[in-house]
Image (cartoon, rainbow, N blue to C red):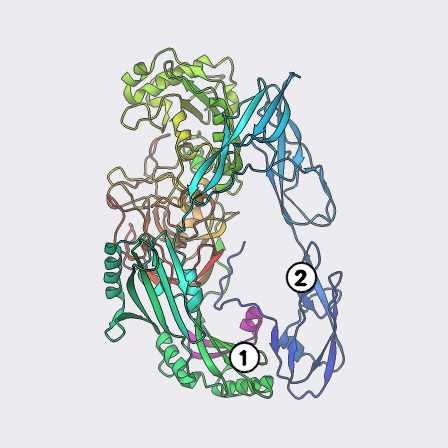
Amino acid sequence: MNNKITRIFLVLGLLFILIACGQDSSFSIHFHSNGGTLVEDITYDEGMVLIMPANPSRDGYTFGGWYWDQETLSAPFSASSLLDRDVLTDADLYAKWELVEYEITYVLFGGLNHGENPSSYTILENHTLLSPSRTNYIFAGWYRDAEYATPITEIEVGSLGDISLYAKWTLDGNSTDTYTIIWQNEDGSVLETDITEVGILPTYNGATPVKTSTETQTFTFMGWTPSVVIVSGNQTYIATYEAHDINLEHPFDPSEVNTIFGYDIIAELPTITTTDYTVLNFSDASYLEVYIDIFDWLESDAIAYSDLLDLMLVYDDVEESWVVGEYFIYIYLDDLTYEGLEVYGIGIYGDLALLSWAGMISVLESDFNEPTLGTILPELEGLTGISLNQVSGSEYGILGSYQQPNNAQMIGYYIEDLELLGYLYNAELSLLKNEDVYTFTISTDLVYALYITYDEVSVEIRFWSFDPTVVESSLETLPTRQTINQYEVQSFGQSGLPSVGTYDVLVIPVEIKDYPFPSDYLTNLELTFNGTSFETGWESVSSFYYKSSFGKLDLNFEITSKYTTLYNKSFYQNHEDLGDQYAIVEALNGLNSQIDYSHYDYNQDGLIDSVIFIYSVDYNSDVDPWWAWVYAAQFGEASSITTLDGKSFEYYMWASYAFLEDGLVSVSNLVVNAETYIHELGHLMGFVDLYSYTHDYGPVGGFDMMDYNGGDHGPLNKLLFGWLQPQLAVKGSYEVTLESYSIDSDGINSAVLIPYRSRDMVDGNAFDEYLLIMFYTPEGLYSGHIVNDYIPNQAGIVVYHIDARLLETTAFWDNYFMYNNDGTSDFIVEILEADKNDSIPSLNNPLQMSDLLTSGTLNLSSYTWHQGGAMNVSIEVLSVIYNTSDTVSFVLTVS
């Protein structure tokens, strides 16, 4: 995707105001849809408003506009082109169409797709779907749904839309024995009965079981009891549920109040922190009266918020309230409305701001810091009931009632007055806005612009300022950077697990002799490492990395049968943090006859890329070796192993089976928890820990999968894994539109990189010092941790300072980076706090919502580069930010 940087806001419209010069004719315009839906002809009379008809549609195509020429479609139609042509007879316009390329997503569940299966298709194409492969499984067909209800063998000509295809597998085996599997609801009713072959993991194919809610509780389906295992006999599985008390708790959403007031009034107040509130609106046509009842506030919270209001706003003694714009705000205690409760809250009230033209100009003069704006923007006579709406940072909508005998004619006269003042028609902005835009130049770096839309009863004037020196071309998208794995190959001739590609990864369950695994351990490990989001309740290691990498890393974990150690727990514990390798040596040698270790050296450097060992003892961070880590064989007992099937053993993960039994607060239907293994796999690919060893919360405040196991991998992680391609911004001013990092699907246009030196990125790697900017929304992979205090529950812009420079001398499997995230300064990655209060690192404070930029301007010049000099970068937010915003727009200035 391209990040189009322009000096205006793109606002779509279909209304053209045509002011003809010296033509006294009318003519018809004929629309030729070229295969699209029929568009009726229209007649245009000189001097009147031309209302363009709705665009045609065509299955499988995107409408590309109207054109004058039929053959080459090279002369686009526009309002100005209609005036420029010497049209004396009827005009013909021809539709241009562009084929839509639909995306195909293959859900392989650990399989390997056939190389000739297409990744996309168009309406004109026919594709016969070929069979994928998977070790120890037989392909049972492609399906359109995860429940395997709708089979599909080909994508036929005429098909439409992005599609997901699900591979169905059956275990490879010769047994023909079958057993009855009964799926039963909690009340004893039978949901489904299946006849299933021995050796198959049974699958429930019906609708999700439900339990009727009560007056006080709702119920979420959690899974089955007993746990579902591979078929070896007749079995009944009973649905289990988790109860949830009914309440009104939900994170505060500013849009509930902002929508009532018509602008972002909450941005002008201290941050409102609550998860249990309701908004009451008692407004009418002329008066706004809004109450926010906050059920989880105590008296101390109300007093603290009052103190913040004192710091931010002016207090009006007459109203006994603080002043916020045109309105008043106060704190109240309600002990009457809710029986038995004392509820604190926030009240906001005031007359609906209906302005005179002079009053409106006064507001704009203050906001634009332009004392002579009244001479630049003359009054539109007859406009009444004026209201002013701030559309974005520097764009306003002036709305009012307007009922003249001929609105079109009067607006035409007003535009003529503007031209006499010095306004000029701007063809470029008109094309982008799809409206007739006029500009008034103040200086080389300040221009005002406006356009007007109207109907029979109302008018809106859009008015804004911009800097004409803002770069209009697209920012450069950086090519994929060198990965840590590629750096290792380049520097040492060998590496660990690659972060891009499709790989099988070996997982060995290690049963400590006196601590056996549960009977369903293989089923749970298969779910944890290879399961789908639906099957796990959140993500498996494989599904997480497939999503986080935008499909660039597709891992299939091959889980062996368990190895049982020769000794009890105490033997390995007596060796403390070296004890893991004694068990590992046993397991690798004990399973040597069953495993082809050479299969796991994908880059053929002589090393097994990685091995994951899951031990059966409960984890304990205070007693080694019963914790989780990634380490190298060269530093312990495993260095005694020579080769395994001709390959050397080196890098490995060691983690407890009990980690998959951990809860996840945000996920009520969790089956297994993969987050610890996901974190450790980041180390297998060469990335470092981002938490602090000296503070509870380090310089990213817990906000990263490599910090507190929370959410997604951050932008530095993805950059060094070869997944993220940020936009490159060097000296200049840019209007940037970024997509939400949280729901990005391709790694492009979701981050901006600002290097310390513009030349730093020419060497193809990202082992440098720079800033990374992303737009966070509480969605995607972050949603599983959204109730944790270190994952923000509201959207905002996050600014990272990165110093990923390498040490001058490095050794294989050793530390490569100059900096880490320990201590109080000189970090590899830190979040530059928008509130600049240095709250992280901290002994008790995670990342705060105020550390994210949500409105206004953030000037970073008070921050310094490690290599010297101030960060002369500023970010001015243009968009109103909501939790579900797909994009954010801001002006980025680098000087």
- 513 vs 604: above or below: above
Mark 2 highlights which residue? Answer: 63
- 145 vs 270: above or below: above
Is 790 on the left-hand or right-hand side of 384?
Answer: left
Check contact, mark 2 vs mark 1: CB within 8 A. no
Residue 118, x across and y down, in percent: 66, 41
Mark 1 highlights which residue? Answer: 458
Disc 1 residue type (three-letter) = Ser
Q: Nearer the viewer, residue 698 or 885?
A: 885
Residue 111, x across and y down, in percent: 58, 30
Regarding residue 653, the answer to whether it shows in the image is no
Identified at 25% across, 76% down, the residue is 318
Is 361 on the left-hand or right-hand side of 192?
Answer: left
Q: Nearer the viewer, mark 2 or mark 1?
A: 1
The mark total stands at 2
Disc 2 residue type (three-letter) = Phe
Residue 334, x across and y down, in percent: 30, 60
- The verdict on residue 427 being magenta is yes
Which quarter of the figure is the C terminus placed in?
bottom left
Regarding residue 169, the answer to whether it shows in the image is yes
Is 448 on the left-hand or right-hand side of 191?
Answer: left
Over which residues does the magenta segment extend? 426-448
Identified at 43% across, 61% down, the residue is 256
Residue 840, x across and y down, in percent: 27, 48
- The verdict on residue 41 being magenta is no
Q: Secondary structure at mark 1?
A: strand
| Disc on the earlier residue, 2 or 1 | 2
Packing grade of label 1 (10 A; few <14, some 14-19, many >=20) is some
Q: Secondary structure at mark 2?
A: strand
In the rendered image, which quarter is residue 719 located in? Answer: top left
In the rendered image, which quarter is residue 132 located in? Answer: top right
In the rendered image, which quarter is residue 253 located in? Answer: bottom left
